[in-house]
């Protein structure tokens, strides 16, 4: 078996375990913030899977405007204030800090 394939096969379970742990962390954070089921789905797509608003909207079968409005509610529930793109970065920083403090 080629070395690259062997490395991928051995690394895959570790990557899956890491991904599952991260998803669990994001789900815990969503619950702590009091997100609804729909907000949690959007939150996971946006912050765990790093999807763009248009991709999130397409996957959830909503408009981009509805996606942005839902994100506004998510930011509010996490206590992120302000306007513009800075909110996404501030929430990512807050999530990183919460993860490091575990």
Image: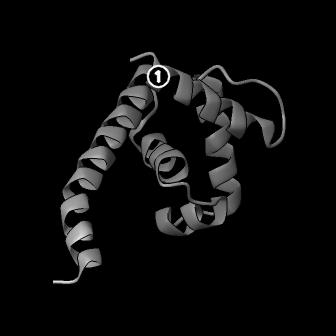
Q: Residue furthest left?
A: 1
Q: Residue furthest front?
A: 3
Residue 27 placement: quadrant: top left
- According to the image, what is the colour scheme of the structure? one colour
Q: Where's the N terminus, which quadrant? A: bottom left
Please state which of residues 92 and 1 is positioned toward the viewer in this rendering. 1
Is 12 on the left or on the right of 89, as rendered? left
Q: Which residue is mark 1?
A: 100
What is the count of numbered marks?
1
Residue 49 position, x and y percent, is: 48, 54
Q: Is residue 33 visible?
A: no
Q: Residue furthest bottom?
A: 1
Question: At 36% across and 32% down in the image, what residue appears?
Answer: 25
Q: Residue at x 55, y 54 (%)?
A: 50
**Where in the figure is residue 53, as x and y percent of width and height?**
65, 58
Q: Residue at x 60, y 25 (%)?
A: 94
Residue 85, compared with residue 9, is above or below; it is: above
Q: Nearer the viewer, residue 92 or 78?
A: 92
Q: Is residue 63 left or right of residue 46?
A: right
In the image, residue 2 sits, relative to residue 90, either above or below, namely below
* Residue lying furthest right: 83
Residue count near mark 1 (Cα–Cα under 10 Å), binned few <14, some 14–19, many ≥20: few
Whether residue 24 is visible here, answered yes or no, is yes
Q: Nearer the viewer, residue 51 or 69?
A: 51
Quarter of the image for residue 8 reads: bottom left
Image x and y of residue 58, in percent:
55, 69
Vertical placement of residue 60 versus 82, above or below: below
Q: Secondary structure at mark 1?
A: helix
Q: Which quadrant: the C terminus?
A: top left
Relative image position of residue 42 (x, y in whole percent): 50, 49
């Amino acid at each position: 078996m080629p070395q690259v394939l062997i490395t991928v096969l051995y690394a895959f379970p570790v990557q899956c375990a890491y991904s599952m742990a991260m998803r669990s962390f994001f789900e815990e954070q969503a619950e702590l913030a009091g997100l609804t089921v729909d907000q949690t789905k959007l939150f996971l797509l946006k912050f765990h899977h790093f999807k763009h608003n248009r991709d999130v909207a397409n996957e959830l079968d909503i408009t981009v405007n509805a996606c942005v409005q839902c994100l506004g509610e998510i930011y509010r529930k996490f206590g992120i204030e302000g306007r513009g793109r800075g909110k996404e970065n501030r929430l990512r920083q807050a999530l990183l800090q919460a993860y490091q403090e575990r």
